[in-house]
Image (cartoon, rainbow, N blue to C red):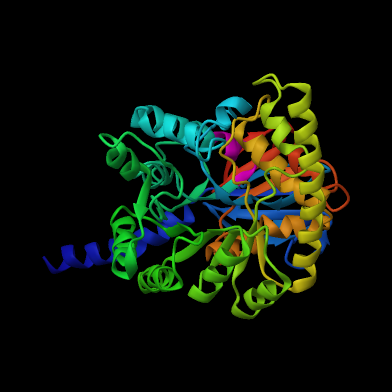
Amino acid sequence: MRRAIAYLLVFLCTAPLAAQSSAAVTLVKAAHLLDPRTGKVLSPAAVLIEGNKIKEVGTPERLQADAPPGVKTLDLGGTTLLPGLIDGHTHLFLNIIVPPQAEIERHFDGLFAPGMLLAVVESPSKRALLGAQMAREDLESGITTVRNLGHSGIDGDTQLRDAINGGRATGPRMLASGRKLIAQGAYVHDLNPALSNAIFNQEFLLVEGSEGARQAVRANLSAGADVIKVTVAEDISVAELTAVVTEAHRQHLKVAVHAGDVVSIQTAIDAGADSIEHGNEVTDEQLSQMSKRGIFLDLTPTFYKDGFLKFIDGVIVLSADDRARLVASGIARTKKYDALVQRVLKSGVKFATGSDMCWFYPGKTRGEASVATFVNLGSAGMPPLDVIRAVTTNAAEMLGWQDRIGALEPGKFADLIAVEGDPLADITELERIKFVMKDGQVVRNDLGARD
């Protein structure tokens, strides 16, 4: 019996070591590797991967010498390696087609609400399959992590996250927010009273007083949420939002606040939000306050320039007057956003970016549409390195996952992408990703790289 127990103890002690030593080892080689944190480029470069983690980064010659016998080598030729991209603000369970102008004008929030309501009333199974498709398309375009901020039904995003983590679905790493916290009437008005509560409760949790705010956070926590999303206008008080933040932080969850105008942005600042989503009307004084408090600004240049027209073309026919009006509003919006980007860069505030993608983009997959949104920051005057940081190192810190993702460093997950050109010279290279790896597994390889 003593001998049997001794053998068992030896087995239990050595089994983890055996499992660790049997983990697959891969050496990825390329002409260059960009470190977003420092802006330095290593040439030539290699990444040694053991299992799903990066073990070492260095020159191919040195890492080849450190690699164990039988290592699998992927030679990506003259490409540049970068960390996998992070979408800090997305909606995988929506794919809204922009309605005609006459239909928009018939409804409260007519651009967004009709498409959202159609998603809510459809079968949860159908919606779940849409979310899985959007997730796969994101990953194939180099987005290896997303933060899904609402509009996924009661548990769509938490269940998709778990399916991806369990290998039952293909997609990026996910932080799931569960249902969005809002004030009554924030998104929809004039619903059929016989159905309104059932519809509303599928998509939202109400913030009604400080205690109601705390209960809403707890409801999302019980559904497995990783982050709390709140939409704030003048309908939610500082006291109510402070209760949300306090309860979320007590449960070790961050709070992302949708805030576009000056008043709602100030409410989010005063309540101690972790990130302010959109923030298009933020003042210089508010940027200074955010910088001092470490609050992230999550930029979402979804409709930058002619972005709105791109969602419409190929879907609906515009009159000449409507097209002219949209072009004019796009020019004005672009000028304003260009100024915002420069003020953000000057302020020193922490910033990241998200696609806010919930729209059907004719001719593009969800991933292609999302990456095109990131690239809009470059068109708005942000230097390429800062754009890359906004979707890698900065975004990782905003999510609280800087110890796991966002950089090609030892100990982090083996999430990496490769482009053929120089992304520091042309940020649109992100739209032409040729190689994607997540968790040490090749997701996409257009290079024919082989051992």
Residue sitting farthest toward the bottom: 292
Q: In this view of the protein, which residue sits in the foreground, 252 or 99? A: 99
Residue 355 in the image, given as x and y percentages of width and height: 63, 46
Tell which of 138 and 379 is nearer to you. 379
Residue under the point 70% across and 76% down: 285
Q: Which residue is depicted at the point 75% across and 55% down?
A: 387
Residue 222 x/y as whole percent: 28, 57
Give the percent coordinates (x, y) of residue 143.
61, 45
Queried whether the magenta region covers residue 137, the answer comes back as yes
Quick one: which residue is furthest to the right in this view?
425
Q: Is residue 387 left or right of residue 356?
A: right
Determine if residue 55 is in view.
no
Determine the residue positioned at 39% across, 74% down.
246
Magenta-tinted stretch: 136-143
Residue 168 picture quarter: top left
Q: Main secondary structure of the magenta part?
A: helix
When the figure is inspected, residue 417 is found, relative to residue 383, above or below; the finding is above
Q: Is residue 439 magenta?
A: no
Question: Would residue 57 be visible to someone looking at this image?
Answer: yes
